[in-house]
Image: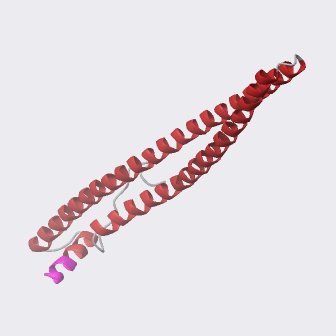
Amino acid sequence: MRVAWDNAIKYGESAKGTDGTRKWWEILKANEHIAHKNALKAAIGMAKMYKDAYLKVRDVALKWKLRLREFNDASASRASLAIEYRKNAEYYRSKQEFPLAKEFEADAVKMDAEELKYKQKAEEAHKISYELEESEKWYIWAQKTAVLNQIRVFIPAGVAQVALPPGLVD
């Protein structure tokens, strides 16, 4: 059978041969077409799977960036409130209303603690967002590798490589 297959390849190269060789040549071309079709289908499926995962990771990274912004806003808000409360405490001290001054000073300390808490949360959000953005590169690499591996698996040795659609592997 292998001899007939090799003869079919030779026939294709020389355009000469018997009817049997011609038949093998037609079978070879049909099998190549099926192999290309299957390889392309598998490669596109694999590319879609990795692209979907990549888009999910990118979406989560974007959400963490939004949280980072919210944490930074909350931190800045607490800082400005602490300043305002300290001004109020100073005002009431100057008016000799010490209980109110003490209350505003306690509120200022509370706002300082909340500011610090939100700064820490912002740092954590930044770290998570950065790590997710860095992992996006891995998804792109994995997608290309998986697509090329699918092509390698589905295209037998000696068969011409399949032409990939533009953008599938850049």
Q: Is residue 9 above or below residue 123?
A: below
Q: Is residue 124 left or right of residue 8?
A: right
Foreground pick, 125 / 62: 125
Q: Looking at the image, which residue sits at the far top?
A: 95
- Find residue 121 and report its image quarter: top right
Q: Where does the magenta region start and end?
A: 1-7
Indicate yes or no whether the magenta region holds residue 5: yes
Q: Please tell me which residue is depicted at 14% across the width and 71% down the height of the picture.
A: 24
Dominant SS in magenta: helix
Closer to us: 9 or 15 = 9
Looking at the rendering, which quadrant does residue 82 occupy?
A: top right
Of 121 and 153, nearer the camera is 121
Q: Residue at x 42, y 57 (%)?
A: 143
Q: Is residue 36 above or below residue 12?
A: above
Nearer to the camera, 123 or 108: 108
x, y percent for residue 10: 25, 76
Q: Position of residue 87 (x, y in %)?
A: 83, 23
Residue 33 forms part of the magenta stretch: no
Quarter placement of the N terminus: bottom left
x 34%, y 56%: residue: 46
